[in-house]
Image (cartoon, grey):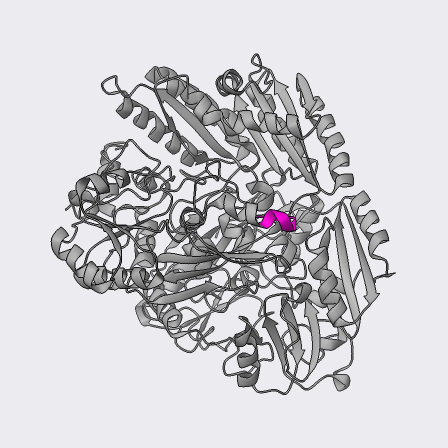
Amino acid sequence: MTEKTSPHPDVPDHDHAAALCEQVAEAQRSGTPLRIAGSGSKAGYGRPVTGTPLDLTRHQGITHYDPVELVVSVRTGTRLAHLQRVLAAAGQHLPFEPPHFGGDATVGGTIATGLSGPRRPWSGAVRDFVLGTRLITHEGRELRFGGEVMKNVAGYDLSRLMVGAQGTLGALTEVSLKVLPRPAAAHGLRLRIPLAAATTKLAKWGRQPIPLAGAAWMDGVLYLRLEGGPRSVAASRERLGGEDLDPDFWEHLREQQLPFFDGAGSGAPGPASAQASDPRPLWRLSVPATTPPLALDGHWLYDWAGAQRWLRSEASALMIREATDRVGGHATCYTPGAAEPFTPLAPVLARHHRQLKQQFDPRGLFNPGRLYPDL
Amino acid sequence: MNILFDERLDGPLPAVDRETTAQRLQQAAPGLTLLVREEDRRPFECDGLAAYRVLPMLVALPDTLEQVTALLRTCHALGVPVVTRGAGTGLSGGALPLEQGVLLVMSRFNRILELDPDARIARVQPGVRNLAISEAAAPHGLYYAPDPSSQIACSIGGNVAENAGGVHCLKYGLTVHNVLALEVLTVEGERMRLGSEALDAPGFDLLALFNGSEGMLGIITEVTVKLLPRPQVAKVIMASFDDLEKAGRAVGDIIAAGIIPGGLEMMDNLAIRAAEDFIHAGYPVEAQAILLCELDGVEADVADDCQRVREVLAEAGATAIALARDDAERALFWAGRKNAFPAVGRMAPDYYCMDGTIPRRELPRVLKGIAELAEHAGLQVANVFHAGDGNLHPLILFDANRPGELALAERVGGRILELCVEAGGSITGEHGVGREKINQMCAQFQPAEITVFHAVKAAFDPQGLLNPGKNIPTLARCAEYGAMHVHDNQLPHPELPRF
C-alpha cells in the first residue's frame, strides 16, 4: 500500500493493487472462488455468489484527472459520490448518470453492473464512456487495456467488454472514463397525455432539434427533461408547454425512489413506508423504443423514451420473457432471489460466453454464477 | 522487420491446395462467384495500404448468406484461412490477402434492408457504403454520424471491423457508439446476433468486442445503426496562429469553456500550404497552424457558442479569426481539410499516413519529436490533427523510387507511433492495426496483455483461421521486435520460444 499527497483531498487515496493481486493468486493456487465485493449497493442485481470476498472498497483514489482532457482515471473502490463531487467542482459530470442505490456505491460496481440512468438514450451508456481499464486476471496479474485517449483501436476492446460482465472475467482495479461538461441549462416538464399520444410525440420530437435528455411516462403523465444552452432550453420549454417538474424527479427515478418502486428491494428503500409497498416483482424490460404496449398485466413505468420499461407484475418469468423476446428485447428481474434474473442466451451465443469465460477464468473463480449458472 | 506474413514469426499456416479448395467450395455453395485465374485475383491483392500486395489463393464474391455460411463451413472443415474484405479502403492492411487463404469479399451485400425514421435506425448489409446510409436517411432529416474521410467508398462492415472514426468523433463518437446490433457468422458458419434494437442486450458486451476486431472473431453479415437528427445549424470558425503550441492550447481552452465542438481540426504549415495550393480554400499560408472549429446544434445555442469560441480564440492569441459566412464558405473551409491527404500527396511522389493518438497536452512535445525525426531522416512531414480527440495524422513524404526511402519512411512512421505510446497514447486511433502496425503493438502492450488478446481470439476462433496474422502480434514477433529495441543490453522477452 502506498500513501501520497492527493490532489483531491476529499477523496481517500489508497493503492491496494498489490495485495489484491496476491489474494487472487492465492485463490488461484487453492482453487477458492472469489466474490468481488464493492459496497454491496447493487448486490441484489444478479444471482448470489458464494466465495471469499475480494474487498475492493479500500482500493480508492482518483489517479489522474485533467478536466481539459475530458478524462478521469479512478481506482474502482472509489465512492461514486466522491468522484461525482470532484467532477462537479470542475463543471463536469458522468453523462450516463449511473444509479447509486446506496451512499457508498463504488465506481467498480458502476462499471461492472453497467447500469445507466435516464439520460442514456441521448448521452450513451456506461460502456460508451469507458476508455481504459486495469484488470486483475486469473493469474493474479494487473494488466492494462485501453488508456486515457478518446480514440484507441489497438487490440481488442477489452475495457468495454468488462462493462456489465459483473466481475466474471476478472477484477477491475482502475478505470478511465470520458467525462463531459455539465449542460449549461436544464429544465423539467410534465404533460398530462395518454401513452399512445406520448409515443407519437416522442418519435416526432426525436427527429427535431429539441434538446431532450429525459423522457418518462407513468399513469397518464409524460415527464420530460430539457438540457442544453439556456436559449434552446427556454425555447423548447415554451414550445412543449406543460407544467414545471420537481427537479428531484430524475434522481428519484434513477435511484428507484419513486413510490412505483416501493418494496422492490434492489434499490435503496423509497420514501414511502414499507406497509404501502407493492408486493409484485419488479421487472426491467429493455425493448426497441417504438414497441407498442406489451400485453402483460401490471403497473408500468416507461423510461428512456420507451426503450426501458419498468413493470410490477405477477406474470410468470416465462410470459414476460416471451413477450419481450417477440419484440426483440429482453427482461431482467430486479427483485432479488429470482433463479434467472437475466434473460437466457441463445445457444450459439451462450457457448461463446462459456468459451470466453473459460479463457479468462479457466477455474471459474471470479464471481461464479453471478450472471448465469454456468458463467 | 517486414510486415508480410512470415511463418517463422507469425506462426505456421496450414498447407492448403487451390484446386481442392475451389472444387469443394463450388460443391458446397452452388452459384458462388469464385475467382481462380491469376488475372481475376490480381485486383484484390491489396487494400488501401497499397505498398503491400499479396495475391490471394482464391477470391470469393458471395451473393447470399447461404453461400457465406457454406464457404465458412467448408473452409473450417478444410482448415483454410479466410480473410474478409469490404470495400478495400482500409489504410492498415486489415484486408491484405494470404497466399494460402480465401479472400471473402462482402461487397455484393449492398442493400439497405430497413430504415425506420420513427425508431431512428437503419438495418443494412455490410457492403453498404457509409455515405449511402446518410443519403437514404436524409429525406427524414436524419443521418449516420461517423464520417471517415473515405465515406463515399468505404462500407459499413469494414467500418465496424475497424471501429472507424472521422472528424466528428469527439461529440458523436466512433462506430462503436453508433452501432446497435450485428448479425455475425462464426468461423464454423453459425449465426449469432450481438446487441439489439433495444438499447442493451443480456450477457457480455460482445457487440463492443466485435467493433474494431478486424475480422478476427467472426464475419459481419448485417449491421443495425443508430441515426441522428441533422443538426439545425452548423457554423465553422477558422483561426490562424503564428505558433503551433498556441493553437494546441486554444483547443484545451475551448473545451475548458464547456464547449464540445462538432469538429475541431488542426493543420500545420506544410499541410495548410498543400491544401491551399490544391483547393484554394482561403487558408492563410503564412500561419504556423490553423484550427477549424465546427459548432452545431440548435440555432440559439450555436450562436452563443460561436461568440464564446471567438472570445476564447482571441484570448489564446489567434492572429486571425474567420467565421464562414454561409454554407458555401463552410464547405470550402472543410474541403481544404478533407482533401489534406491528396493535397499533401501532390507535394511528393508518395506519402505515408500515420494514425497515432495522444493526450492533447502532449501535443507540443510530440510535434517537436516528429519534427526532429523528420529532420534527422531528411524527410518532410505534414501534420493533420483531429485536435479535439487527440488523433494525430502525420503524413510522411517520400519517393518510393529512391532506393531505401520507403523503408526509411516506415522507420520514421514506426518511431512516431512509439512516441505516441511514450506520451501515453495509442498507435492507432481509427485506422486499425491490421498488418501495418503489427510490430508497434509490441510497444503498446506487454506480453501478458498480448496473451489475453490471443485468449479472446481463441474463444471465437481456436484454430486461428480468421484473418491470421492481423491485429495481434505473436509473442515471437514481439521478441524479435524487442531485440531490435534492446535497452541496457537486456532482451525484453527472454522467456519466449522462437519459431
> Residue B112 location, x and y as percent?
49, 54
Q: Which residues are magenta?
A: B137-143
> Residue A330 location, x and y as percent?
54, 73
Above/below status of B447 relative to B288: below
> Residue B148 location, x and y as percent?
49, 39
Residue A18 in view: no
Q: Is residue B141 magenta?
A: yes
Q: Residue furthest top?
A: B286
Q: Residue at x 31, y 55 (%)?
A: B62
Please tell me how many numbered marks the rendered image carries: 0
> Residue A111 location, x and y as percent?
54, 60
Specify the quadrant of the image occupied by residue B9.
top left
- Front position in the image: B409 or B130: B130
Q: Residue at x 65, y 64 (%)?
A: A100
Question: Left or right: B374 with respect to A8?
Answer: left
Residue A91 in view: yes
